[in-house]
Every structure is written in structure tokens, then in C-alpha cells.
Amino acid sequence: MTVSLPCIVFVQVALVRLLASAGIQPSAVIGHSTGEMVYAYADEIFALGRELQSAVKLGMTDRPLRLNVGLVDALPKSLASELLRPALNMDQAVHLVVWEGKLRDLVEDLVMDRLDIVLSDDRARETGPSKVYHHALGECGVRFLARPALARRLMKTFPASLDGAPALMPTVNTHMRGALETWFNRHEVQPHIIAEIEDGALIKDLAEDGHGFIAVPDFVADKIQNRHGLVEIGRAEDCREKVWAISIERRLSHPAVQAVTEANRKRMG
């Protein structure tokens, strides 16, 4: 018996709707070939079901605005939280969903309409046949921080003092690492790299423990200093950290995405 592809998809979608109407939410859904398309549809259906249950339980009359964000894993989380804050401060309730990953994977999800926006510290290089648009949110300089004893020693002859100083560096796959290497070469200093770490939380914890200095975007440096007990060594205004919002729209239409881009352009522009 030959069964057409549309019939298979119809049956799969109908099954998803039947499960959702019965209040059944599977712990996992996988798909292959056309099943991948149905999986994405199913994931949205069950997510909406969970939102509905929560809204009814809380007595909400208006459905929250769902915002699906892709966050490049190399972007400092302290910076990401500041970037997303305007969406959560909207008058309208927002249901924020943040996915973390590599830029290429997140852009693929973006063009598949699984994400509304991707926040990144770099531009997407390869997007295949689908076009994406880069919206510059702003840029800022870099601030070097360390525990008080180390900071006091290094700030006296900054930036020359960084030569041979213990450094906790981001990994080579990050935009920040490339910008720092360029800045070090320009000032003819070569820090002693103690560790190369992709995770922003871990690198700040190690700096708090006194293992070396770190470089952070100036936009969030005050918060990091206060939270981790770090002191400023010096600033590199010519070492720039840029932030991009990547979308499939030239003109942004999602209200929460508009709030994120407009507020951060005013603060960082």
C-alpha cells in the first residue's frame, strides 16, 4: 500500500493535537525527515499547553507574549541579562525562553522560525540560502579587573604591567579573545595565561579567588566588580566589544524584540 507524504504528515499532526487535547504531554518527542517538521510543531503545541495551564492557575486574563531568544554561548551572561532586561520590564507580560548554543546552530533555528532573535558578539558568517539581518545594539570598551592585591600591583604602570601578569582568558573561539589579542599586540604586552575558559561564570569565580585578571565589557563591569569583589586595573576603550541582534526581518515587528533593540541602542549606542 502506498501512502502519500501529506497523509503521513496529517496523521502525525492529528496525533499531536489528540495528545494535547487529552492533556498528555510526552517527556520527549523525536522525529526523522518529515517527522522533524512535525516535532517542531508538536513542541510548540505542548509549550502553548503548558503556558495555558500556568495562565489559568494564576488567573491571568491576557496571554503572555512569548519571546524565543538564541544566546551565543560566548556572550558574557552578565551582559546577556542586561540586554534582555527591557523585555521583562514591558507593561505586557512576557514569557521568555532562552536557548544557548553556537552561533551557526542558533541561526539555523532562527531561519526555521524556532527563534525570534539571536543575541551575539559576532556576525553570522554563513547562513545558506536564507538571509538574516544584523541589527547593531551597540558597543563598549573593555575593563580589566582583578582582586584588590593584584589590581593594585598592576594598575601602577598599566598597560605595560599586564606583560607577564596572570590572566584568565576567554577561549580562542570567542570574539572577545580576538579583540584582546589584537589589543595586547598593539601595546606590546603578553600576559601569562593561567587558564582559557569559555564559561563566563567560571572565569569570574576564578578571578574572585585571585588566580588572575579578567577582561569584561565596560557596560557590565560595575556589576561584576561589586558582585565578585574585584577592582579595576585599567580600561581599554580601543578594544571594543560589539553586540548584535540577528533576525530574519529587516524591520523588527515582535514587540519584545523591539523593546530589547531600542532600549539597548539608547544605552550602548
Image (cartoon, rainbow, N blue to C red):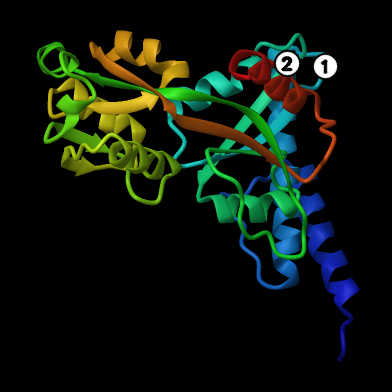
Residue 65 seen in the current view: no
Q: Are marks 2 and 1 in contact (CB under 8 Å)?
A: yes
Q: Which residue is mark 1?
A: 62
Task: Count the marks.
Answer: 2
- SS at badge 2: loop
- SS at badge 1: loop
52, 203: nearer the viewer:
203
Can you say which quadrant of the picture contains the C terminus? top right
Which residue sits at x=73%, y=36%? 49
Q: Where is residue 54 drawn, in percent x and y?
A: 68, 23
Which residue sits at x=47%, y=36%? 75
Can you say which quadrant of the picture contains the N terminus? bottom right
Q: 10 Å neighbourhood of mark 2: few (<14), some, or many (≥20)?
A: some
Q: Can you tell which of label 2 and label 1 is closer to the viewer?
A: 2
Residue 69 position (above or below residue 259): below
Residue 14 position (above or below residue 106): below
Please identify the quarter of the rendering in which residue 99 is found. Answer: top right
* Disc on the earlier residue, 2 or 1: 1
Which residue sits at x=21%, y=36%? 189
What amino acid is found at the position of numbered circle 1 in the picture?
Asp
Q: Which residue is mark 2?
A: 93
150, 44: nearer the viewer:
150
- Distance, label 2 to label 1, CA atoms, is 8 Å
Residue 99 position (above or below residue 262): below
Please, which residue is most extreme toward the bottom here?
1
Q: Where is residue 240 drawn, in percent x and y?
A: 47, 30
Residue 76 seen in the current view: yes
Q: Where is residue 36 drawn, in percent x and y?
A: 69, 64
Please identify the quarter of the rendering in which residue 223 is found. Answer: top left
What amino acid is found at the position of numbered circle 2 in the picture?
Ala
